[in-house]
Image (cartoon, grey):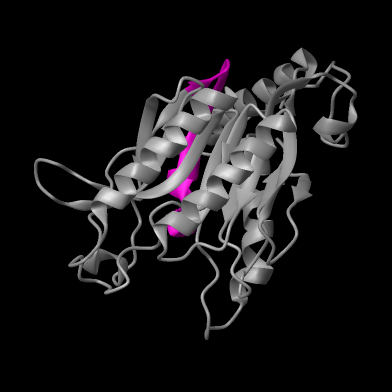
Amino acid sequence: MAKWDGAYTWHKRPSAIGAPDRLRVATCQIPVGHDIAANAAQILSLIEAAAEAGADVAHFPECALSGYGSANWPDWTGFDWFGLQVAVEAVQSAARRHRVWVATGCVHRDDATQKKFNSLYVFNRDGQLAGRYDKRCCSTNDQRAFELGRHQLILDIEGVSCGFLICRDWSYPELWRAYEGQVELVFHSACADGQGRDKNETHTIPPLMQAYGRQYVYAVSSANSCRYSQDYPSLWVERGGYMGGQATRHEAGFTMNALADDPEQDRFFAAVLESRRAERILYQFED
């Protein structure tokens, strides 16, 4: 990186500069289960609470609305598709009523093919579907119930360019690097609360989120299901990798954080990205 002549440096936490908020995000968590009505009730309650707290976006875990597939996994027989549609419409109505963006995990069924996807719906302040991201890196077990997603998603939310990923997409740096220089914030939704397995993710995923935030200089909102076996609490990583707020582990609720409206920070991070692009060519990683 060429000699930096600005006031902002890596040593300064973005949120500690005193700049005004640019985008306020409530990173929410609920104990995701197979009861769609119960999931929806908790989501609606947190949307209202987040909006009252001043959030621009309420962000929820993987499969938060629908539950993680059918209770008859991996068979979809008996799944309440009508009840899910009612719940989706209720979330859209809440987004419209409270004038807040909502990003929530939900099973998506393609009408034409009947294929199912592990998806993230993004609704704008008018309750309209602004975009849908389908999980790309489903496990072998997941693929018994879900199709693989094939595309990234980038949306403009109140002037902030945002990307989206789901759970074990965390294992593939290629997906995170694909957003480098294109977004300022990645919404990552997870359902990492498996019972009866080791808790390696408790110790590894939060620092991994920080590493992605530092390496690609975007913020990360990671919303995780909070059954009592929750691997890690929902959290926020500031641009540059500083750990931000975290929700209370195992409890429904949210942590409120924000991107700073600071042109000097933006100039610094742009310089970092430009330097890395040049160095990749210098080191012959790229042509």
The quarter of the rendered structure image containing the C terminus is top left
In this view, the residue farthest toward the left is 112
Which residue is more in the foreground, 285 or 22?
22
The magenta segment: 156-180
The quarter of the rendered structure image containing the N terminus is top right
- Left/right placement of residue 228 relative to residue 280 reads right
Based on the picture, tell me whether residue 26 belongs to the magenta stretch. Answer: no
Q: In this view, does 198 lie above or below 77?
A: below
Q: In this view, does 276 lie above or below 285?
A: above
Would residue 281 be seen by someone viewing this image from the given angle? no
Would residue 255 be seen by someone viewing this image from the given angle? yes
Q: How many labels does the image show?
A: 0
x, y percent for residue 30: 58, 57
x, y percent for residue 130: 39, 25
- Left/right placement of residue 131 relative to residue 266 reads left
Question: In the image, what residue occupies the spot 22% across and 55% down?
Answer: 147
Question: In the image, what residue occupies the spot 62% across and 69% down?
Answer: 231
Based on the picture, tell me whether residue 167 belongs to the magenta stretch. Answer: yes
Question: In the image, what residue occupies the spot 35% across and 36% down?
Answer: 132
Question: In the image, what residue occupies the spot 14% across and 41% down?
Answer: 111
- Left/right placement of residue 44 relative to residue 256 reads left
Which residue is more in the foreground, 22 or 66?
66
x, y percent for residue 223: 59, 51
Q: Is residue 277 above or below residue 29?
A: above
Place residue 127 in its image quadrant: top left
x, y percent for residue 56: 63, 26
In this view, the residue farthest toward the bottom is 196
